[in-house]
Amino acid sequence: MYRTAATGNSPAGMETSFYLQKQKRMKSILNIFNLSFLTAILLLATGCSDDNSSALRLNEDTAIKSFALDNYSGAIDPQKETITITLPEDYDMAAMTVTDIQLPAGAEATLKQGDVLNLNMTQTVKVANGNVFQQYVIQTRYDEARILTFQLNDMYSGIIDQQNQNILVQVPASADITKLVPTYTATEGAIVAPAGGTAMDFSRPVDFIVSNNMASAVYTVKVLTPAGKPAAVYAGLASTIEGLNPEEKEAATWMLFNVKDAQYVSFSDIASGNADLSECKVLWWHFHADATIDDMNKFETAAPAALSAADAIKTRYEQGMNLLLTRYATFYAVNLGASKDNKNPNNCWLGHTEAEPEITAEPWSFFIQGHENHPAYQGIHEGNAVYTCGKGYGITNTTAQWHLRSQDGANPWGDYNDEADWSRKHGGQALGYGGDGAIVVWEYPADGGKGGVFCIGSGCYDWYSEGIDTSKDPYHGNVAKFTKNAIDYLTGK
């Protein structure tokens, strides 16, 4: 008697059923193993990371409740993991004390109240609670209160001296300075009073108060209505002072604020007769270029507007107008006929550009041995040296100076045997020297009715340093004092 396979009791059917049951048991075992393994991995990932916040937040709390440095409360962002401290402008962050730190129950932090931090460097605080970690980056920002741009009647732009918080606006003599409309821009979030957009009387200086949370500033706006015949002039290649490069603009702005009856005048206006120099006692040109100008062809190619005005300026020079020529402008003495041999400075180069300056490793100076009593150096020299910047200043080290053969002994490089030979042939009088003996400051004295020409070609003489706070430099102020001394000397003050 035979049983069919349909009954499921055949030897083949029994073997198949046993196999399926075995396979199901194996899958269950594997599933249990996989689940256990995955759980272990998650636990390890949660509990073993010391440097990163956990994505698995269980029941522990790592959110800092409050935090303060020097009693300035921080804005805590648990999601971005940052603590932002808002400080007054120019606040010293080198040694800030943790004055408050409040944590959740059971949490511990790597900082405690009383710890001192240098916020000039990146600082963090790590909070742990059980097996959960979270790290916060402590960052700072300043409340700034600055006027960034200033105009009158939407056409007369102000020259802003941020360091001294002064604004100078030149307007034509025909303008009614009792009814000028100011407009301005300021740092984000700042409030300025009085408000712009309405006519105001600028016949006297007007103060504008800027406030932004903890920061405040007072800018004094002075309107200059220039006379037709200025007593002092800063000459430039640009049509307006705003068109100058930063180095030249810094110098020109200083002159307009610090030299009485000074004006900015373009060489083009001088050449065309639109600028009257008939009563000008001193003309200053500070010529900077991010390039090496080491011969007359390069100079004349770089400054064609100055060449077009040379005849008019030479006429006034021969009538007694004085000139201050600095950096590459020292070449201009040749165009004016101030030198005997019509030769330009023979030791010229651009060390670095404004965007990528040389950072000084120590204070820079030039030497004035034998000339310590010259009026140009009064109040600024230390012994036989004049320091112009301290350590950490960013400088281009642009020079236009004189190399002498005596510096190299028998080396024939250079046109003059020594200082006496240079003075006899060229006609200049040396007043300052580089460390290698090069002549870096000199003059062509007033003679026979001609004015005097004072020249500064030292790489130490620098007005603008990109990204450097020059107000904290111990020697940079000597550049302005030196310049004022030279102008006063030329004008007989």
Image (spheres, rainbow, N blue to C red):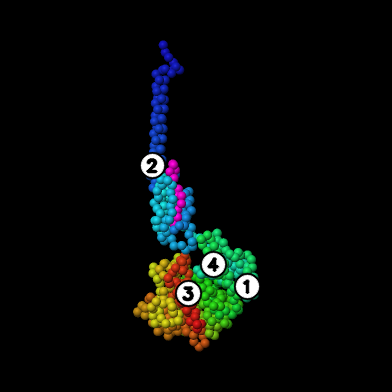
In the figure, 125 relative to 340: above or below?
above
Crowding near pointer 1: few (<14 within 10 Å), some, many (20+)? many
Measured from the top left, where is residue 203 in percent x and y? 61, 73
Q: In the displayed structure, does residue 363 sit left or right of residue 285? A: left
| Residue placed under numbered mark 3 in the picture | 480
Q: Main secondary structure of the magenta part?
A: loop
In the figure, 46 relative to 187: above or below?
above
Q: CA distance from mark 4 to mark 2?
A: 59 Å
Tell me the residue at 55%/80% (across/down).
231
Q: Camera-side residue: 210 or 396?
A: 210
In the rendered image, residue 48 lying in the magenta stretch gets the answer: no
| Residue placed under numbered mark 1 in the picture | 177
Q: Identify the mark nearer the N-term, 1 or 4.
A: 1
Magenta stretch, residue numbers? 56-69
Residue type, mark 1 in image: Ile
Q: Secondary structure at mark 4?
A: strand
Residue type, mark 2 in image: Leu
Crowding near pointer 2: few (<14 within 10 Å), some, many (20+)? few
Measured from the top left, where is residue 282 in percent x and y? 52, 80
